[in-house]
Amino acid sequence: MTLEQKINFSRPLTHISFYLMLAALTANAWIQGAPGIIYFLCLFPLAIFIPGLIVNNTRTLIWICFVILIYFATAIDNLAGPSPQVLDWVEVALTVILFNAAMMYARWKQQRGKALQEAYDKQEQEALQQEQEQQQSAG
């Protein structure tokens, strides 16, 4: 699998799992009959990443990985409680998928950026050498 194929696979997986995570959190709060402030407290830490996710910002992906760990710990705590719900299992699965997809997507994007930078630097160096050779032959 090439780097571009990996990126093309992980990007939609990251987006889908992110939005499914928001939906699962909303559904879980709704089932529990939570007041509006709980919706805000549950969804806001993830919702602030939506603009960065839309423009595919690498730093946003990295921060999603940090923040999603809080949701993972909460979901595990809910599962260890007296009456775990099906959505708690869904949240655990989605946090694992989202963490891994975002982490690998960020890594592969950085690798692609590094490869593009190296190719650009090589091209610049070759152009500089050609220019120096032309100056030496003219002078």
Image: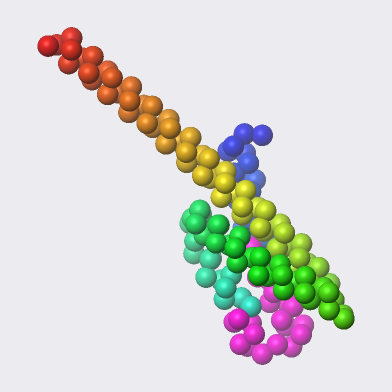
State the residue in front, 111 or 26: 111
> Does residue 60 belong to the magenta stretch?
no
Q: Quadrant of residue 21?
A: bottom right
Give the image location of residue 86, x and y in percent: 84, 72
State the residue at coordinates (28%, 19%). 129
Which image quarter is the C terminus in? top left
Q: Residue furthest bottom?
A: 35
State the residue at coordinates (65%, 52%). 101
Which image quarter is the N terminus in? top right
User: What colour scheme does the image use?
Assistant: rainbow
Q: Main secondary structure of the magenta part?
A: helix
State the residue at coordinates (83%, 79%). 81
Give the image location of residue 89, x and y in percent: 81, 68
Residue 94 in sight from this viewpoint:
yes
Range drawn in magenta: 18-41
Q: Quadrant of residue 131?
A: top left
Residue 19 in sight from this viewpoint:
no
Q: Residue furthest right?
A: 82
Give the image location of residue 119, x and y in percent: 43, 30
Q: Residue furthest left?
A: 139
> Does residue 21 belong to the magenta stretch?
yes
